[in-house]
Amino acid sequence: MSEVVLKKPRKVVKKFQARPQHEGEGAVVRRSIGRYELKHFDPFLLLDEFSVTSPAGFPDHPHRGFETVTYMLQGAVKHEDFEGHKGTIKAGDLQWMTAGRGIVHSEMPAGEGTQKGLQLWVNLSSKNKMIEPKYQELQRNDIAFVSRDGVEVRVIAGESMGARSPVYTRTPMMYLDFTLSPSAHIWQPIDPTWNAFVYILEGEAFVGAEGSGPMGPHNVLLLSHGDGLEVWNRSTHLVRFVLIGGEPLGEPVAQLGPFVMNTQEEIDQTVDDYRFYINGFEKARHWRSEALIGIDDY
């Protein structure tokens, strides 16, 4: 790809490998952001690389105060919520769900074998935490894609190599899925004020400096501040990774599981709202997903 001049290239300042843990009902996730080494990385709250095989999954559960970004890598999951919104997220598809003031939903495997994907939680500013829920959904062929000089990029959010995602991000950010052929090299501009990180999915990448060592799968790499990032593939195999960055909100974070607000008082209110089916959770009183109803019937 054509060279981009970076005045202050970003470097890796912290790295660790996401190890498997159990979540939901029998599902396994590799959690990088959202665990004890890295509780939050403003504006990001969580990144899971998940694997689910039926009957495991993520049955009925609530969210408030942030957005979930589900990007399928293999297989498919069925999604449904208490508003009647339902569908199947297939390999390469994207679902950007703004939970806002409240959603109760389920995410369950949609076929045989193991279904794999990434789920990112993006925090919302205090002014947006109680907005009405909303979805942005893109099928694989609708996601902006560029292939040039041994580099492929799928633009989930933001812009890369002249392509821009149609997704509207309330918290300004980028989410790029790169695949590098052997000997390929990328330069990707990043807003100097944003926090950014890399999560490696496949292969071994050299990230941030020519003299850096190879970084393998399931590693999360936090980047220093700067105006962009360079990555090399010096192996004989493909390298695939996501580059995610966003504008920090700079607001306090109060979190209780799937509820993320700014203060403990707001968390207490959210717990009451969910318990008593008010202030956005009214429809949770009588709703159960088809997946759970099927289990009950069985």
Image (spheres, rainbow, N blue to C red):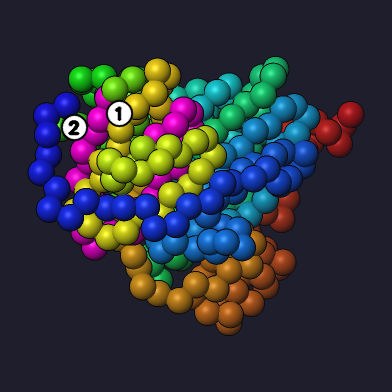
Residue at the spot x=49%, y=63% of the render?
Answer: 40
Amino acid at pointer 1? Val
Residue at 58% from the left image edge and 80% from the top image edge? 264
71 vs 108, left or right, is left
Q: In front: 221, or 279?
A: 221
The residue singled out by tag 2 in the image is 161
Q: Position of residue 88 (x, y in %)?
A: 55, 27
Quadrant (top left/top right/bottom left/bottom right) for the N terminus: top left
Contact check, label 2 and label 1, Cβ < 8 Å:
yes
Q: Is residue 106 magenta?
A: no
- Looking at this view, name the residue that lies furthest to the right: 298
User: Helix, strand or loop at disc 2?
Assistant: loop
Residue found at the far front of this picture: 211
First of labels 2, 1 by sequence position: 1
User: On the image, numbered disc 1 is attached to which residue?
Assistant: 153
Three-letter amino acid code at the position of disc 2: Met
Q: Position of residue 262 (x, y in %)?
A: 48, 75
Magenta span: 184-205
Q: CA distance from mark 2 to mark 1?
A: 8 Å
Q: Is residue 14 visible?
A: yes
